Image: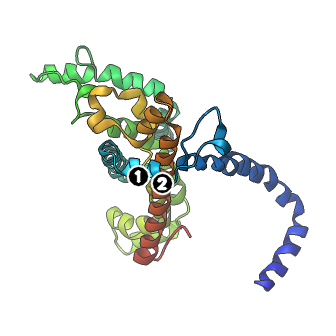
Amino acid sequence: MKDKNKAFWPLVRKNYDIYLLLIPGIVFVILIRYVPMYGLLTAFQNYNIYRGVLASPFVGLKNYINLFGSAKFYEVLRNTLVISFGKIIVSFPLSILIALMLNELRLVIFKRIFQTILYLPHFLSWVIVSGLVISAAAPSNGIINDAIRALGGEPIAFLMDNVWFPWILILSETWKEVGYSAIVFIAALSGINVELYEAAAVDGASKLKQIIHITIPGILSVIILMFVLKLGGILDANTEQVLLLYNPTVYKTGDVVGTYIYRTGVALSNYSYATAIGFFESLVGLGLVVLGNTISRKAYGRSVW
């Protein structure tokens, strides 16, 4: 440790100008991410907005006892896990597939056109995307139900159906984000040595075998990194998207942790209970990241840290 310190400080002195550039970023992270963490105290209080954090009465684990004793919370937790895992199962492999397909295009003009088409939805706000989804899924004149009627079927109120609503969330987010998510994998593909493909072609390997034995192993570390990061946000389920699309008729399958926090914390002013839920969400996210990283390290010998 002493040897490392001796090597570190001369390096800092030599490159002091570069290290000075880190200061604004470090200060920003401390002020925005760490200083507000004192608000976690409200999870263990009966928080009163007029008395503030320091003067509100301490209640210990009462909020967590109420949380884990609530049947509604377990329903919300189940919905969140189903929707989040559904998004990962559908969109994550699809983003890798899109990256592989774009990587195989040789005409630059077509590659750029398809990339632009796939990336564009990411830059639309969820307000716009939600409006498109609501219009497309409308029972009376939505394009989806028009197609169903044309095929002889009955219109479906997708946004008011507890079976269909989670699929609406999964598919709409996949459409919006899958192209942009592929960017990371496309960047990783560009780092694979072209000579490996040339050698494989000389040995008679088909395109499929080249993808299986060269491409996938070449970007495996990036795949693991992105998967571990997605696990960390498993209890998020994109609250903004759900808030814009859901309604009381689909609370049974569409109400997620984020919307539950919003309703209990903001709408009902139960700040302590909402903070307890949020803290629990963060701890679960941290645990899943650590677990995913550990499994990856033991199974594949590669990990984020």
Q: Which mark is residue 65?
A: 1
Is any atom of residue 177 visible in this view?
A: yes
Q: CA distance from mark 1 to mark 2?
A: 6 Å
Is residue 10 rendered to the left or right of residue 300? right
Q: Left or right: 121 with respect to 187?
A: left
Taking the spot 59% from the left edge, 45% from the top edge, the residue there is: 57
Q: Which class describes the residues within 10 Å of circle 2: few (<14), some (14-19), or many (20+)?
A: few
**Foreground pick, 302 / 99:** 302
Query: Which numbered dot is residue 35?
Result: none
Amino acid at the residue labelled 2: Leu
Q: Of 112 and 13, which appears nearest the observer?
A: 13
Residue 96's x, y, as percent?
41, 54
**Residue 304, percent from left and from top:** 54, 67
Q: Secondary structure at mark 1?
A: helix
Q: How is the image coloured?
A: rainbow
Residue 130, compared with residue 89, is above or below; it is above
Q: Nearer the viewer, residue 288 or 147?
A: 288
| Residue at screen point 69% across, 45% down | 32
Quarter in which the N terminus is drawn: bottom right
What residue type is disc 1 on? Answer: Ile
Q: Secondary structure at mark 2?
A: loop
Specify the quadrant that holds the C terminus: bottom right
Q: In this figure, what is the number of numbered marks? A: 2
The residue positioned farthest toward the left in the image shown = 152
Do callouts 1 and 2 mark residues in contact (Cβ within 8 Å)? yes
Residue to which mark 2 is pinned: 61
Q: Is residue 161 above or below residue 17?
A: above
